Image (cartoon, rainbow, N blue to C red):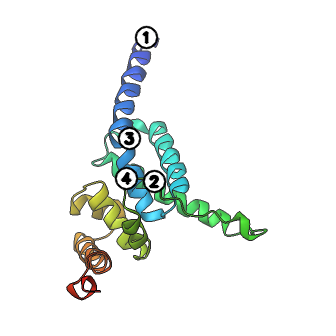
Amino acid sequence: MGALARIQVVAQDQGRFARFYEAHRDACLRAVLAVVGDRHAAEELVAEAFAKAWAAWRTVQRHPAPAAWVVRTALNTRVSWWRRRRREVALADHDIAAPAIGGTGVDAALMAALRRLPARQREVIALRVFLDLDTETTARVLGIASGTVTAHLARAVATLRGQLVPTPHQEAR
């Protein structure tokens, strides 16, 4: 392949990736934010995941759900960061960042309720609801059975409904 042909292929890849990024960045950010609960950390994780997606774009673009690949990569990066950081010792309380919720496009009460869910249920909600993936794709991304995805989703929705939807008894107060 000549140099000109390689340049054209790279330019086409850049265009495809730019369109993918524009179309999926916000949804990926909301999905990661739903799991992480910290806007700043979610933005860093998603940026890192998109950088990795660009580096492996020829593979990622053939993935059945490239946006899910980005979210899974962001969540895996979070685990790597956590493992590295758990060996560090905080010097004082001021080193702990407060969670930032403003401007996410997601209701603050919903974000608080999502943070109270177990991690796997948050991941299922992030992929099924925020990225609108089907059960099979969510199962493949998380490495679990589709029935397990359905069970986690049902439990999460029931928990969220109990926390967010007022009952007639609560409305009477």
Crowd around label 4: few <14 · some 14–19 · many ≥20 (10 Å): few
Q: Which mark is residue 73?
A: 2
Query: On the picture, is 99 further left or further right than 50?
Result: right
Name the residue nearer the viewer: 161 or 76. 161
- Residue type pointed to by label 2: Thr
Crowd around label 2: few <14 · some 14–19 · many ≥20 (10 Å): some
Question: Residue sitting at 63 percent across and 62 percent down?
Answer: 97
Q: Which mark is residue 105?
A: 4
**Of label 2 and label 4, which has the lower sequence position?**
2
Q: Find the distance from the CA under tag 2 to the CA under tag 4.
A: 22 Å
**Of label 4 and label 1, which has the lower sequence position?**
1
Query: On the picture, is 69 further left or further right than 41?
Result: left
Name the residue nearer the viewer: 55 or 123. 123
Crowd around label 3: few <14 · some 14–19 · many ≥20 (10 Å): few
| Residue linked to disc 3 | 59
Q: Are marks 4 and 3 in contact (CB under 8 Å)?
A: no
Q: Which mark is residue 4?
A: 1
- Residue type pointed to by label 1: Leu
Callout 1: helix, strand or loop?
A: helix
Percent position (x, y) of residue 110? 36, 67
Viewer-nearest of labels 4 and 1? 4
**Of label 1 and label 3, which has the lower sequence position?**
1
- Residue type pointed to by label 4: Gly
Q: Find the distance from the CA under tag 3 to the CA under tag 2.
A: 14 Å
**Of label 3 and label 2, which has the lower sequence position?**
3
